[in-house]
Image: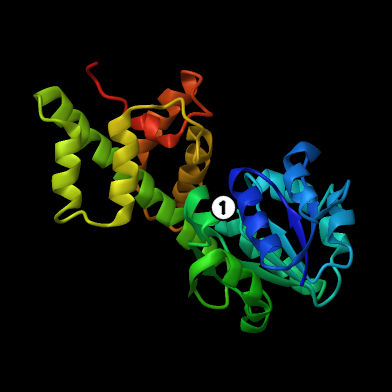
Amino acid sequence: MKIAWLGLGNMGSVMAARALAAGHELVLYNRTRKKAEGLLERGARFAETPGGAVTGAELVVTMLADDAALRDVLEAGGALDAMAPDSVHVSMSTISPALAQELAARHAARRVGFVGAPVFGRPDAAAAGKLFVLTGGDPAAVSRAQPLFEALAQKVLSLGPAPEAAHLTKVLGNFMLLSSVKALAEALDVAHSSGLAPQALLEALTGSVFSAPFYAGYGKLLVEQNFDRPAAFTVGLAKKDLDLAVSAARRVDAPLPTAMTVLDKLEELLGAGSAQQDVTAIGRFTKP
């Protein structure tokens, strides 16, 4: 399948590599060509503009940082105008449900399919093909993207025919993830300050009522207290995602008070210049 891939950040580059290894033909676009070099060595091609990448593609995958970046490649970059009728745009970025709803209508007017397909999982899960893909869109369009999903995901979960439903689920899931990281960090901090080894607490929790792999994975990072490692999910992106969840809640007058506590901590870290640190930096222990 001929796929235009727009966006080669921490997640996008790993996902594109999986698609390429599965035998798909990839034409890449990224603001900086350097991030594409490894994929080019394996047979992908590079386009100098988003519109150039999209021309002739069956699927167009966007994996970009935020709403503004997506609008930029679609509008100023010419990608939307260059999409062929009956092609399908697979929106895998974490974007606002409102933008997904708007784009669904704009694509339909051009006879282009639009599928919301954000993912749950960090880069290591992407590399192993173990992501969870959330889909929203016309069933025929979702079916067109299924070969791609098979290369990327351990499970595909349908949220129905509305692309914005998939993106709403993603931002609410990230709200829950970030809130859980903060709660776990606070518990580990109390243990550390009390003289109980944080690792012992983590093992007790994950060996009983908190056995989900999420707690073990993030708990290990929190216990290590190494916030200078390469970030899989940065403080800056976490703040953006939580803002999207709060915005979605406000649109329907349903408050997210827990989110505000986490936002306060993220804003504190941003003010300290920690935008590129891993989000587990919200769990720095109070005492050395």
Residue located at (61% from left, 54% from top): 93
Quadrant showing the C terminus = top left
Which corner quadrant of the image does residue 109 belong to? bottom right
Residue located at (73% from left, 40% from top): 35
Q: Nearer the viewer, residue 199 or 272?
A: 199
Image side of residue 174 versus residue 136, left or right: left
Identity, as a three-letter code, of the amino acid under mark 1: Thr
The furthest residue to the top:
288
10 Å crowding of disc 1: few (<14), some (14-19), many (20+):
many
Residue 273 against residue 135 in the figure, above or below: above
Residue 177 against residue 87 in the figure, above or below: above
Residue located at (80% from left, 49% from top): 40
In the picture of the structure, the residue carrying the numbered disc 1 is: 94
Q: Nearer the viewer, residue 242 or 183?
A: 183
* Relative image position of residue 136 (x, y in whole percent): 56, 72
Looking at the image, how many numbered discs can be counted on the residues? 1
Q: Is residue 24 visible?
A: yes
* Relative image position of residue 19 (x, y in whole percent): 67, 62
The furthest residue to the bottom:
140
* Relative image position of residue 90 (x, y in whole percent): 67, 65
Disc 1 is placed on an element classified as loop
Residue located at (67% from left, 56% from top): 16
